[in-house]
Amino acid sequence: MEPVTTTSYIVLGIALFMLLNSAALAVYAERRVAAFIQNRWGPNRVGPYGLFQPIADVVKLLLKEDVTPARGFKTIHAIAPMIPVFTALMTVAVIPFGDGLYATDINSGVLYILAINSLGVYGITLGGWASNSKYSLLGGLRAAAQMISYELPMGLAVASCILFAGSLSFIDVVNSQEVWWNVIRNPIAAVIFIVTAFAEANRTPFDLPEAEHELVGGYHTEYSSMKFGMFFLAEYMHVVVGSMLITTFFFGGYHLPFAGLWLPEMGVTAKAILDVSVFVLKTVFFAFLFIWVRWTIPRFKYNQVMKLGWKRLLPISIFNFLGLAVIVYFWHHYIA
């Protein structure tokens, strides 16, 4: 693990600030993209082009009454919405945004991300249980079952990246894609990871934990005011974090395609600006993909979600990883 420097603190502070604000931008983008797909205007009253609509939403949530179920577990009911927000914030500590632009580099950064990413569901499950509502409880149980079902293929997809990098460090994973991105070397794992990222973020078509046509509002049925707002914030933060992870694991991180072959030598500042710009543009594209899919594909049935995870993605990810491991072994020992 590298020592924490002043630059690390600066990068971490900027990353946290941008992640918190990216949720508001993602909400605005969701409404704009949804309006475009449905051939309507979207937000256009509060501020120029409706840009102040997210601020109006925050003010509205702050002014709403904070209702806690009389027979619920009040302490856990209040703490639960904070858990997915904190887990989303904790992920940016090890993600590299450019050459040397990261908060810290730990030897097991990939394991850290997988562990932290799986903790967010505890907030949903605890919130559903503490609400003392059958709808909330069913939503929390669905979230837990969905996380277990899709965590395994996600882990195997990430393991394929480790085979190429030969390390659990995020820096090594990104540097191993300087020439060939993992989406080119292993497209099956890339597709599996993207699908599981949707499921982990509880986004359509995997938003069964909050299926309003079955469970009223699912795990946040009994939430209001800023407690509901934190669940709302966490969802979009996990969309942005998921987009960052897709970019980092399979689309070269801050690297441009074959940059070493055509990109000229650049100064430190220019290189940093280019790296961050490339990373942000890739992240924005995948955040747009999350939104696009929501307003294009209908919600799955619960049995379809379970069947896809256990009978399709898990076997495919196992065979894909085993086949790739054999290829990498023979490449290093008999060919290279």
Image: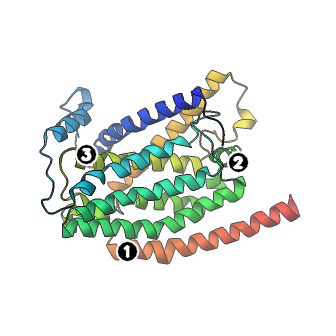
Q: Amino acid at mark 2?
A: Ser
Residue closer to the observer: 71 or 29: 71
Name which residue lies at 59% across and 59% down.
158
Q: Which badge, 2 or 3, is on the more N-terminal residue?
A: 2
Q: Which badge, 1 or 2, is on the more N-terminal residue?
A: 2
Where does the C terminus fall, quadrant-wise?
A: bottom right
Residue under label 3? 229
In the rendered image, the vertical position of residue 256 relative to residue 72, given as above or below: above
Q: Which badge, 1 or 3, is on the more N-terminal residue?
A: 3
Question: Left or right: 195 with respect to 81?
Answer: right
Residue under label 2? 176
Where does the N terminus fall, quadrant-wise?
A: top right
Residue closer to the observer: 141 or 312: 141
In the rendered image, the vertical position of residue 146 relative to residue 242, given as above or below: below
In the rendered image, the vertical position of residue 169 relative to residue 259, given as above or below: below
Q: Which mark is residue 304?
A: 1
Contact between labelled residues 2 and 1, with CB atoms less than 8 Å apart? no
Q: Provide the secondary structure element on which disc 2 rests.
A: loop
In the rendered image, residue 106, in percent from the top left (x then y), is placed at: 63, 46
